[in-house]
Each structure stands twice: as C-alpha cells, then as structure tokens.
Amino acid sequence: MQRIGVFVCHCGTNIAATVDVKKVVEMALHEPGVVHAEDYAYMCSEAGQELIHKAIKEKHLTGLVVCSCSPRMHETTFRNAAEKAGLNPYMVEIANIREHCSWIHKNIDEATEKAVILMRAAVAKVNLDAPLQPGESRVTKRALVIGGGIAGIQTALDIAEAGYPVDIVEKTPSIGGRMSQLDKTFPTLDCSSCILTPKMGEVNAHPLINIYTYSEVESVSGFVGDFTVEIRKKARSVDMNKCTGCGLCQEKCPSKKTPSEFNRGLSTRSAIYTPFAQAVPNVPVIDRDACIKFKTGKCGICSKVCQAGAIDYEQKDEIVTEKYGAIVVATGFDMIKLDRYDEYAYSQSKDVITSLELERIMNAAGPTGGHLERLSDGKAPKEIVFIQCVGSRCADDRGKSYCSKICCMYTAKHAMLIRDKYPDTNVTVFYIDVRTPGKNFDEFYRRAVEDYGVNYIKGQVGKVIPQPDGKLLVQGADLIDNKQILKEADMVVLAAAIEPNPDVRKIATMLTASIDTNNFLTEAHAKLRPVESPTAGIFLSGVCQGPKDIPETVSQAGAAAVKAIGLLAKDKLLTNPCTAHSDELLCNGCSQCANVCPYGAISYEDKEVNDHGIRETRRIAVVNDALCQGCGACTVTCPSGAMDLQGFSNRQILAEVDAICR
Amino acid sequence: MKYSYYPGCTLKNKAQDLDQYARASAEVLGFELEEISEWQCCGGVYPLGSDEIATKLSSVRALNDAKEKGQDLVTLCSACHHVIKRVNDDMKNVEDIRTRANNYMALDEPYNGETTVLHFLEVLRDRVGFDEVKKKVVNPLTGKKIGAYYGCLLLRPGKLLAFDNPENPKIMEDFIRAIGAEPVIYPYRNECCGGYISLKEEDMSKEMCRKIEESASGFGADMLITACPLCMYNLNKNNGGNLPVYYFTELLAEALGVKEEVKAQ
C-alpha cells in the first residue's frame, strides 16, 4: 500500500477563487492510500516545495499528488522536489485543476466537485505507480538549420562559433533570404546588402558550416540528440566544384523569359541563373522547366560556352543522410497573395504594387536600376499612396487576424526615402494605427512625419480606382476629420500581410513540431520558452515563429543557437522511462503495434517462452527503449492487451477512469 | 429542364423586357421557366431588422413552392434575387427566423431552406454553360464594346450570395464574350447606382450614376448591360442619353435571334 501525500495549490487566486481548496484537501483524506493532505498559496515556490519535502520525510510518503497547474508547467519542478527528498520522481502525479478546471469554470461548487474528481483520479493512479529509472541516450554533436535567411545564417554562425558543426539547408539556389531582397533597413537606413553579404560570406567560409543550397529536407527520424535527416540535393545541373561563377552561361542563355523570383516577377531571368549577383554560392542552377535543352533536347549553349566544363545535364537529385543532435527551423515568410483584395486593383493595375516590389524598385540592382518609376509607363510618380494593414489585423477570414508587425516601420522608411530622394513627390500613408514599439522606432516614424512631411491619414482605403488616363483614384476615409477622401495617385503601394513560408506545414509534420492556426510554429511556452518547440530538440528562429523585424530576428536566432548549443554541449541525455513493453505471454506477434508506431521503435524476435509449463518459440514484439517516445499508440492498438506503457499502464488508466466514475 | 421562376413585380410592368427576352432565350437554350402561381412581391429590400419576419414570408412561400415541385428557383431581378437568396439562407441557418416563419406559415411540412436559388445568369454559367450559349448564338454582337454593370445587390454580401468575386467579378464579362461582344472592364462596375435614394436625394444618385457612366465610357464602353430594373431606372434617368443601357436578356435574345419575335408580341 502506498503512503500518498496530496498537495493542493491555490495558485494565488487562479485556482482558489474558483475551487474550494480546503474542500479538496478534506476530500483527499478520505481517499485510499492518502495519509497526508494540505494546501498552500504557491506550491511551486521555494516554501511550497519545502512543505512537500517536510511531509515526505515526516510521513514517510511513497507517492505524491500535486493538484495545481498543467504538468507542462510544473511537473518537472515537483518531480525534482520529490527526488531531493529521496522519492523516485515518477511517483509524482499532477492533477491539473487550473487549466482543466478553475480557468474554464465559473461556478465554485461545480469547479470544486471537478477538482475533487481530478484529485481522486490522480490518487488512483499513484496507488499503482512504480518507481522508474530513466535510461541514457547519446547526443550527436552537429546541428541542422533549415532555411538560409538572416535567421538561419545567424543561428548557424552562433552555433559554429561555439565549436559545433552546422549544416544549413536552403531551398533556393542561394542563401540570403528575404533580407537580400531589401534595399535599406530601418531604423538606421543602412543598406541591407551591405550588412547581409558579409554574413553570407562568413557562413560560406566558416570551417564548421556546410551549406546545402537548392536542397530540401526530405525526411526526419529519431529524436532529441539523435535525429537522422535525409536531405534532397536537387540536381543543379552545374558542377559546384568546377564552376568558377564567371556568369557567361547566364549571359548567353537564349531562354530569358522566366519571371525573376528575386525581383518578385518585375524582371525576367535566364533559364540558367543565380538569383542575384551576390549569391552564395556563386554557382548557377538550371531551371529545367525553362531550359530549352531540357524541353526540346536542342540548345546546349551554356555547356558550349562554359570554359570550366561545369555544365552537367545528366546530374540527378542526390539524397544525403546525416545525423544531428539539434534542429533549428528558420523557414521565414512570404507576403500573402492579394487575390482576396481585388478592391485595391493589384491585379488590374501595374502601378499598384506591394511593398516588397517597391523594395526591389528602389534597389540599385533592381528591375529599374533604383529609379522610382511607374511600371505601366516608366514615368516618375508625383503622388504616391501607401495603404497599410492589407490583410493584417483582419476581422474576417479574408486575411490574417494578427498584426504583421514590420509594415508600419518599413512604410515609414519607404515614405522617408522617397521624400528624401524625390522631394517633389508627395507621399500619403493610410493607416489604422501606427505601431512603432522598438528602439529608436517611434523617433524614426516621427521624422518621416515632421522632417520629411509625409502625410499620414488615419483611415482605411475602400477602393483603388484605375482611371482611363492611367492615374489611380484612391477612395478612403479620414477618421480624424470624419470625411471621405478621393485622392488621385500615380502609384499605390500595399503593405501586404506576411505569412509563414508555405513549406512550413510539411516541415513541421516531419519534425512533429506543432503549428498554430496561422501556420506559425508554436513555442514550448509563450513567455518562458519562446525559441523552443514543444518537441524536444527542435528550436525556432525568425519569422517561422511569428512576425518580427531584422533586429528581433537576429536576437531570436542567437537565442535559438544558445538553446541548441546547450543541448549539443551534453554528452548524454536522460531518456523518458515511460516506454512501452510487450508481455511475452500475451503477444501473438500480429505486427499491428509496429504498423502504428510513429518512431519505428518496434521490431520482432523469435523467442522461447514458457507458457504455463509449455515451452515454445513465438514471434514477439520487442520495443527499442531508445526510440520509444511513450506515445501509447501501440498500447491502444494491441488486440491482445500485450502492449503496456510504463507509468501509464492500462491498469492505471482504468483505475483513473474508475475513480472519475465513482 | 424546368425551373420554378419568380419574376417579381417590376418585371410585370416597367421591366417587361427583362422578363420576356429571358423566357424566349430560355426556350432557345433548352430550358423552361415555369412561373410560380400566386407569387407575391419580395418586398424589394431585404429587411435588416433581426425580429422582422412578415416581409420575408413571400420569399418563403415562393421557395416552398419550388421545393414542393422539386425544382430550383430562378430569379432575374437583382433585388428579388438578393432578397430571396438571403431569406433562403435565413431559413437554412437562422433558427429563430426559421421557427417563427414556419410557425406562422403552418405548411404541411416545415421549410428549412432546401431550395436552390439561382439567378438567370447563374443558370447560363453553371447549368447551361457559356460555351453552350455561344454555340446557340446565331447573331453574334461582334464589335460591340459592352460594360457590364453589376451594381451591388447581385454581388453582396459576397459569401452569402456566392454569386461571384464581389471585388472582381467576371460572370457578366463571360456572358458578353459568349454573345460575341467585347467586355469592357471598368472599376465602377460593382459600385452602387444609388438605389432607392434617388427618390429622396436625387443629386446623390445622379453623382453616383455619373461616376459609373464616365468610368465605363472612359474605358471605351459603347453601352451598359444590367440585370436590375432599379439600376436601369437610375442610369437612364441620370445619364443624359450618352450611354445606352440594356437588360442583358435583350442582348441575349438578339444574339440568339429571337429578339424580333419578342418585340412583335
């Protein structure tokens, strides 16, 4: 028989305002096995843990039930407290009477009754708990970074600087990401390329960093400390070792009509291309969908002009398999498609552009050589209207519910740069709110208004009306003057919402990392573990976790690197002892458990068993403890009840159900 | 193919053209519009009062009539279409209205929004197909530059009417192409003509119509087509005759070669 102590936490008023904690204590004392029960304001505090310590010692407790918040919050805290007092940490059960009870109920009587029931279930489980010993697993001292934008670059550099090898997998032909497409950066207005390209070079030259560009993660298996990842190196059709990056092939390529991804479709590129001049690596790829040689079999000009003999039309995709201890996701973002915002005439007029397109137009290496001009007729715009929050902070399902966070600042930047370079061009910004929290951010915005005379109008635009003469009529509201505005413009710039890279769903599924309704990767704890995924060994860097600007991305990239380094610095990890095992006498070797196991942890052995005096050889399921994550899928699948999960045995679960139904 | 047909009051007097050309065209295109017996006025405006049911009942009667015949319900007038489609949605999805309307009507079997409501243009697009329409055209309106005037009632609320993209529709442009003419896309095609406001604030409606017509002719339209008698009224009244406005069914009948027949009746 266990000697169980029940500890009921008030969590200040979080629990105590809705649950009668004294009543839970009183009821606990009637439960079988319970020899001690008490309540306290903050059980997780030093003083609360001291109460637990004292009770274990004085009452010779063998098991604990803590009625408190979610086990995701403090299970580890209480397990450690128990261990310090000499108890096996797996003899601790949490009854979640906060998230599952007090936070979601209003009626005190009902909430108290539920809290008592949850306590009872936990007591029933502890009664059947047995001490468990965690095993150990090794840590592969190598990190994988998925995505080669500024987030991935910074994370890789920081990890490598700590002495651990890092691989970067980047889908496009070059690292650099969105930041390489930007012209200037707020709030200092330094040129984006000038601060990014040295970092790209640094990553490329770092002896501990290996870059796979034009590559994608194909599959991920294993677990924290010991991931096995297959990387698909897409056929570049150019030999990386031979190519000198002279660029002659791109010059001579006769297929030049493909829209340039880098210039957001505002210019075209050749079929053999590097996305931009400062690409890393400076080795082109052949876009086989656009290449005449691949489409018709005729051409081969690039091969003929290549002095180095680097062109290889026969090259095939290659799968590289590598082991990693930690994986950092840095998959970044894109702008939303504007097909649900036809009132802004983006698809109807060439002079309605997105902010990222403007970024390319303003850039000296962009489609217009850095001259601000209308894409319809090449004329210099004299009136420019910016529309903020296009698809951000959207109340219906047309757009995104969240604030994209970067648009207020980059719009102020665009407005200021245009007023500075083209003083006779008027700039108007329609906004819902101007949000500039950040170091030197509000000062920056005020400079746009006060020093550069940018006209900010609080109100939204209802419609952009292309006129027969090529001008645009912007119909909006001025909420401060309470009047309708009809404003003629030569160019309209839309601050389209940003959304996570669409590939992130696929990657999250491979990593079993959770994502939210907006496809942002979820952090383990919104406040206390913001750069870790709830899945152990997976870390988050940059906009894949939520909208952020460059300074914030770089900070988070560093934080993710530190977390990864912390993991890689360990030689061994303790494994979760709550693993499945099969009962030899019950198992009939049907393979159903192996079929449902997501971790490939189950195999079969022919084993001699002694079934009530009869010796025979049977095919029996065997679980690899190092691979098993204790998900329990096999235990519910097993038709003969042979599979059981330590710490969550079938008997324990049913005892909990019995206690709830009592 | 037979459809239940709800013409509405205006189509029985001011907008007889809209109705007659549609019936004749339907015959050529191989479907029949069977007028609902004893239909009543739809009310002209969808009542926004959440406790209002009296003005929704005529729509419910028409919808239930179609349901009993096992037919889809076809409308032509934008306003009728708007009212009936929205009432149908209420009957399907708003429990309070459904219960009260059914209690009041005391039908043999309660009406729960089972009928599909189709605008005549939707029949052309989704049932007949514009490709088929094109095949039946004997008198293509080649060279005519036509601006489609949608107005607001056909398109909005977009999710509920599910007629077309309210900000960038194309059903009428596809229709114009099917009858051999050239559509002119202009930004004011989905703006309001003023509707009933023209009775009270004539100047406002005038201004709204002026914008529509200037925009359409600016982009090169020779004429406008509409499905709405009220839009027709406002555009004609306010436009100084610069830009002729036709019901889309008249051009359809012309293209199908039955216009003269109807006129002779």
Image (cartoon, coloured by chain):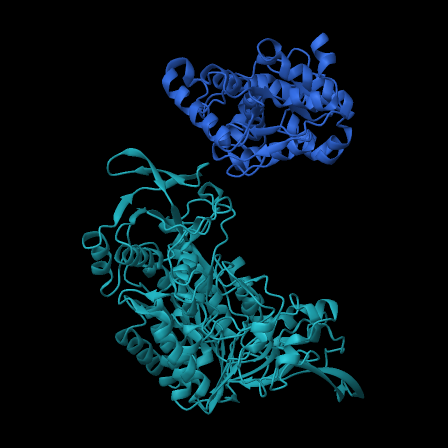
Most foreground residue, A370 or B21: A370
- The residue shown at (29%, 68%) is A42
Query: For residue A93, what is the image quadrant?
Result: bottom left
Percent across and percent down for residue A593 are 69, 74
Percent across and percent down for residue A413 are 30, 59
Q: Is residue A315 above or below residue A493?
A: below
Query: For residue A200, what is the image quadrant?
Result: bottom left
Left or right: residue A7 versus residue A41 is right
Shade of chain A as shown in the rendered figure? cyan
Percent across and percent down for residue A199 are 39, 80
Question: In the image, which lettered chain appears blue?
Answer: B
Left or right: residue B28 versus residue A194 is right
Residue furthest to the left:
A450
Tally of numbered tags: 0
Most foreground residue, A139 or B214: B214
- For residue A400, say whether it is visible: yes
- For residue A16, say whether it is visible: no
Percent across and percent down for residue A29 are 39, 67
Q: Is residue A238 above or below residue A641?
A: below
Q: Is residue B207 above or below residue A90?
A: above
Most foreground residue, B64 or A320: A320
- The residue shown at (39%, 15%) is B202
